[in-house]
Image (cartoon, rainbow, N blue to C red):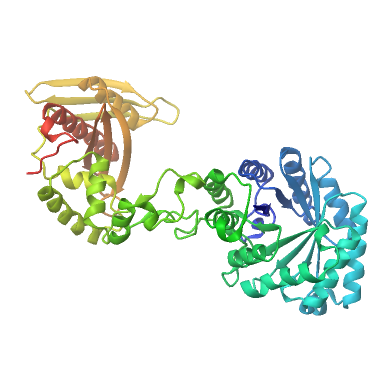
């Protein structure tokens, strides 16, 4: 099966996204993750642009050992010298030269005739060849360049010593048919084309970057250029993860694949999103939060019977744990029952139907229904939990230069009292350790969340905690205008529920009886 080389330009074209400015350390961190992902080549920056960019490319060149590090350069000797300096410590350096070739660029930007473009580009390639064994040449705006002239430019680049010729759809203007035809024409008409690799560099202005890149592969492209998460100027670049997974999922059609470590895709996407500050849209293909999420009842039913009914690739392939059945107003009874089983509740049909009706009422009011909401729905219908312990008072001492200390007074069911004090990493931690000492319960805090019940400075705060003990897991809730008090009440509430579950097997998570 034909190998498609991956040229990543997240650090160069991706950094040109408005508002993105990576420092040297961030560039190296992303570069090392791209190395783990297994990209063949990575474009680290444009050294002639600024001293900072030169230093960033140099740092990446020193850090990366298992991929070719590339620097961008205009067809000017001073740019080539800057790139040479930046890449002097690279294990496998490559220079990326470019010069515009389209009529609109020749006339308005370069003010050059065709022969001048050819002469300038050839001189630059020959000059660079003195220092670099690997040179990629890009006729900028190739998509809008006359085909016969593009053939002439490609032939010149091969003759001058380029090892890769890239065909950029610089402004995202091409359709897949047109773009694929460029590669087909070059393959059929340029002498010596077999000596070099052809590369595809697409922008997403019309939303066709991935489609165009795949069309290029079908017509003979050897390399795809793009970015993680599709970031880049304007509407961005080809998403590397989309091309990689299209080739993986449709191998029989494309008869080509990358050598990426696909299980690193999700991790790489998260890192790039974090360091660039560019949030990945929920509906983004492959790496969006909803890419493997299903809310429709019909879809959920199909997924539970056979995943391939609605999922053409598995989340595990890109490094995620599993698909998500998102419970919302469109969800069906089948998915709801499976969620109950997943949470540890095995109910008969009558009680599932009663709980499902309550769930639907809640889903109409709340956009995202969490596992804790479902547990709360079930447990609010159980017999009232006896208060073995109740919170009487709490006292917290805290300062940014002192260790948080908490004292709690707990009332017992028989009327007695327990009082304990503890220190912790924070106020809540101190409170919980004091409660643990008073109740002598050994529990694990599995989740802790706060939400505002009302508005304003005196808003009620509601704290939810999930405690685990062995096979038991319980949800506790506490409400107060003071978050520390609400936190303590939630914790004591959860301990009471835990004790009740241990005492009443019929009401454990394995066999909950609704009243």
Residue 98 percent across, percent down from the top left: 80, 63
Identified at 74% across, 41% down, the residue is 59
Nearer the observer, 282 or 338 = 338
Q: Left or right? Give the position of 38 relative to 404.
A: right
Residue 449 percent across, percent down from the top left: 32, 42
Image quadrant assignment for residue 171: bottom right
Identified at 65% across, 50% down, the residue is 22
Up/down of 36 relative to 210, above or below: above
Nearer the observer, 515 or 308 = 308
Q: Left or right? Give the position of 140 relative to 203.
A: right
Q: Left or right? Give the position of 8 relative to 408.
A: right
Up/down of 418 relative to 344, above or below: above
Identified at 11% across, 35% down, the residue is 385
Residue 356 percent across, percent down from the top left: 17, 54
Numbered circles on residues, count: 0
The answer to whether residue 242 shows anywhere in this view is no
Instruction: Specify the quadrant that holds the C terminus.
Output: top left
Image quadrant assignment for residue 474: top left
Q: Left or right? Give the position of 129 relative to 222.
A: right
The answer to whether residue 327 shows anywhere in this view is yes
Residue 247 percent across, percent down from the top left: 58, 56
Nearer the observer, 250 or 81 = 250
């Amino acid at each position: 099966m034909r190998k498609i080389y991956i040229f990543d330009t997240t650090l160069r074209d991706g950094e040109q996204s408005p508002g993105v400015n990576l420092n040297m350390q961030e560039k190296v961190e992303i570069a090392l993750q791209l190395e783990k992902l297994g990209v063949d080549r990575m474009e680290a920056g444009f050294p002639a642009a600024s001293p900072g960019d030169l230093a960033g490319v140099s740092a990446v060149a020193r850090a990366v050992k298992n991929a070719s590090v590339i620097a961008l350069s205009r067809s000017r000797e001073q740019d080539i010298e800057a790139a040479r300096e930046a890449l002097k410590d690279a294990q496998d350096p490559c220079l990326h030269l470019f010069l515009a070739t389209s009529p609109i660029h020749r006339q308005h930007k370069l003010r050059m005739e065709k022969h001048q473009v050819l002469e300038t580009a050839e001189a630059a390639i020959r000059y660079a060849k003195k220092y670099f064994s690997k040179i990629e040449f890009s006729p900028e705006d190739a998509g809008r360049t006359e085909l016969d002239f593009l053939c002439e430019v490609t032939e010149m680049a091969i003759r001058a010593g380029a090892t890769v010729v890239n065909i950029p759809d610089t402004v995202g203007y091409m359709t897949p048919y047109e773009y694929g035809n460029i590669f087909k024409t070059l393959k059929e008409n340029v002498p010596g084309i077999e000596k070099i690799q052809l590369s595809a560099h697409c922008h997403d202005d019309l939303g066709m970057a991935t489609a165009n890149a795949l069309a290029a592969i079908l017509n003979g492209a050897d390399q795809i250029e793009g970015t993680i998460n599709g970031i880049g100027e304007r509407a961005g670049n080809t998403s590397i993860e989309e091309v990689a997974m299209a080739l993986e999922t449709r191998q029989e059609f494309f008869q080509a694949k990358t050598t990426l470590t696909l299980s690193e895709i999700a991790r790489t996407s998260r890192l790039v999103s974090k360091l660039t500050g560019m949030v990945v849209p929920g509906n983004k293909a492959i790496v969006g939060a909803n890419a493997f999420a299903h809310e429709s009842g019909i879809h959920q039913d199909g997924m539970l019977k056979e995943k391939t009914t609605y999922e053409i690739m598995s989340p595990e392939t890109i490094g995620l744990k599993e698909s998500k059945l998102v419970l919302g107003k469109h969800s069906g009874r089948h998915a709801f029952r499976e969620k109950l089983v997943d949470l540890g509740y095995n109910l008969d049909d009558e009680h599932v139907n009663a709980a499902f009706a309550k769930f639907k009422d809640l889903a109409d009011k709340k956009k995202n229904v969490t596992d804790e909401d479902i547990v709360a729905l079930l447990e609010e219908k159980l017999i009232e939990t006896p208060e073995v312990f109740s919170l009487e008072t709490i006292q917290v001492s805290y300062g940014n230069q002192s260790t948080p200390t908490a004292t709690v007074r707990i009332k017992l069911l028989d009327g007695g009292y327990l009082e304990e004090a503890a220190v912790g990493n924070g106020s809540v931690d101190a409170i919980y350790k004091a409660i643990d000492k008073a109740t002598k319960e050994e529990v694990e805090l599995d989740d802790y969340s706060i939400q505002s019940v009302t508005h304003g400075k005196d808003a009620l705060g509601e704290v939810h905690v999930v405690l685990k003990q062995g096979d038991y897991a319980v949800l506790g809730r506490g409400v107060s205008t003071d978050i520390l008090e609400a936190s303590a009440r939630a914790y004591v509430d959860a301990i009471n529920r835990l004790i009740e579950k241990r005492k009443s097997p019929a009401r454990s998570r394995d066999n909950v009886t609704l009243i």
